[in-house]
Image (tube, rainbow, N blue to C red):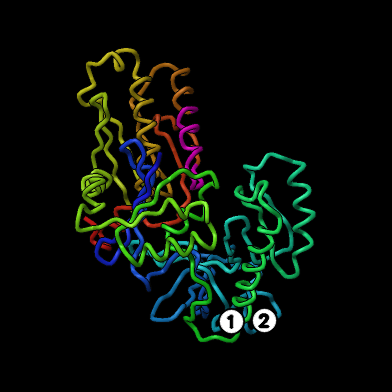
């Protein structure tokens, strides 16, 4: 059974999943006032830069965000120009897509979305979408017809995986809440002051509760009264199935950080070197343009795995690489230098195994190819800062 722990460390909140004495996920949330993906603000276009196909948008308090022209479709902007484009000085609601990174501004979009447990409401063209994980075509067809009749504005509705076989009235109740929030954003985007927050994205620890399956068997532990109230209030309203699994611990008896050895775990997840059971190790080097992961035989150089052509050894490394990419929240371009193998069949086995391992990552991740130099290319969507940056920024050591 997985245990989810939520505790405060300085100004930050650490949320982690632990199963079989191994972390399954880890996120660090900054204090209130930090930008959170999902937040929607009233913004003003400060400048349009055609050379980089984007524009800079102020959301107040000297915060400029970057908006790609490709993500500036159907803006709710004032005024509306004849050319249909955004100009400097335009005011509109924008949603934080990715928070601020090292030397990079937050990115925003105009095709904002509001996420519930069963539905996602997406500003833009009218349509009904369904999660690709739902394979019951008859159910999807019936639900598209049902939900299509609810749409009364310029937005799409997507049925999330959690919606499968959920009660239609329960889904409709959530739709009405999302529609009310949508109308607040549409109205406020034209009437409120620059920098006004129109919609708050959920902190990560509540996103985990929202997005987990309805058959979740986790227990949820916290030692903070405010977090406990927030979690239990959310469970009462949206996840009553989780309410009895929430427990408030007494920090003075044994802090969660110590009980689950979180300091050591964080040190390991921010270390450059990662040891494998075979005695081999990985070296993980994040850089500005990409992350490079080098696989070294280390103490395993005389092992049977190495003498057998390195496949077993590389497969062990592939499993740990998939784990480290997810836990460290590495993104963008990732280059992996596995130990060279002579067998073409072994290389195909390694590549397919790596693809299978990365398929379970909730963040879109793709194994692109293997180069002539036997370097494996991986891309992973950027959604949050790397874990190492959050640890440094919030002093979570």
Q: Quadrant of residue 284?
A: top left
Give the quarter of the image for residue 8: bottom left
How far from the left and from the top, in percent, is residue 118? 61, 55
Counting residues from the start of the chain, the first of labels 1 and 2 encountered is 2
Q: Is residue 26 left or right of residue 297?
A: right
User: Is residue 12 visible to the viewer in this orientation of the structure?
Assistant: yes
**229 with respect to 367 (left or right):** left
Whether 358 is among the magenta residues is yes
Mark 1 lies on residue: 188
Q: Which mark identifies residue 80?
A: 2
Q: Is residue 242 above or below residue 294?
A: below
- Give the secondary structure at mark 2: loop
Q: In the image, residue 352 lies at what x, y percent? A: 50, 27
In the image, residue 386 sits, relative to residue 92, either above or below, namely above
Q: Residue at x 74, y 63 (%)?
A: 126
What's drawn in magenta, residue-wise? 352-365
């Amino acid at each position: 059974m997985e245990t989810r722990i939520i505790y405060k460390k300085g100004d930050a909140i650490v949320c982690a999943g632990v199963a079989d004495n191994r972390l399954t996920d880890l996120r660090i949330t900054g204090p209130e006032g930090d930008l959170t993906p999902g937040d929607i603000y009233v913004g003003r276009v400060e400048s349009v830069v055609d050379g980089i196909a984007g524009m800079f948008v102020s959301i107040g308090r000297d915060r400029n965000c970057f908006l790609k022209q490709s993500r500036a479709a159907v803006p709710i902007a004032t005024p509306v120009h004849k050319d249909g484009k955004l100009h400097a000085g335009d005011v509109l609601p924008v949603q934080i897509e990715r928070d601020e990174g090292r030397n990079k501004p937050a990115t925003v979009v105009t095709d904002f979305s509001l996420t519930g447990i069963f539905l996602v409401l997406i500003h833009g063209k009218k349509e009904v979408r369904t999660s690709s994980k739902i394979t019951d075509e008859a159910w999807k067809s019936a639900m598209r017809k049902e939900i299509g009749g609810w749409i009364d504005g310029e937005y799409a509705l997507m049925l999330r995986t959690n919606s499968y076989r959920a009660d239609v009235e329960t889904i409709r109740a959530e739709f009405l809440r999302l529609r009310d929030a949508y109308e607040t954003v549409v109205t406020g985007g034209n009437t409120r002051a620059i920098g006004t927050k129109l919609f708050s994205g959920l902190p990560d620890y509540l996103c985990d509760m929202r997005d987990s399956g309805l058959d979740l068997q986790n227990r949820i532990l916290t030692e903070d009264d405010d977090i406990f109230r927030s979690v239990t209030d959310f469970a009462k309203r949206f996840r009553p199935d989780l309410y009895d699994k929430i427990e408030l611990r007494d920090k003075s008896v044994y802090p969660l950080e110590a009980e689950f050895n979180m300091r050591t775990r964080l040190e390991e997840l921010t270390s450059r070197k990662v040891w494998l059971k075979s005695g081999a190790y990985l070296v993980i080097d994040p850089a500005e343009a990409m992350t490079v992961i080098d696989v070294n035989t280390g103490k395993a150089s005389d092992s049977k795995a190495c003498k057998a052509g390195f496949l077993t050894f590389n497969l062990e490394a592939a499993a740990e690489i998939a784990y480290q990419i997810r836990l460290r929240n590495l993104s963008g371009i990732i280059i992996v230098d596995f130990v060279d193998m002579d067998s073409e069949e072994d290389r195909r086995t390694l590549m397919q195994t790596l693809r299978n391992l990365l398929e379970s990552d909730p963040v879109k991740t793709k194994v692109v190819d293997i180069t002539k130099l036997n370097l494996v290319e991986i891309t992973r969507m950027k959604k949050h800062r790397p874990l190492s940056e959050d640890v440094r920024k919030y002093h979570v050591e």
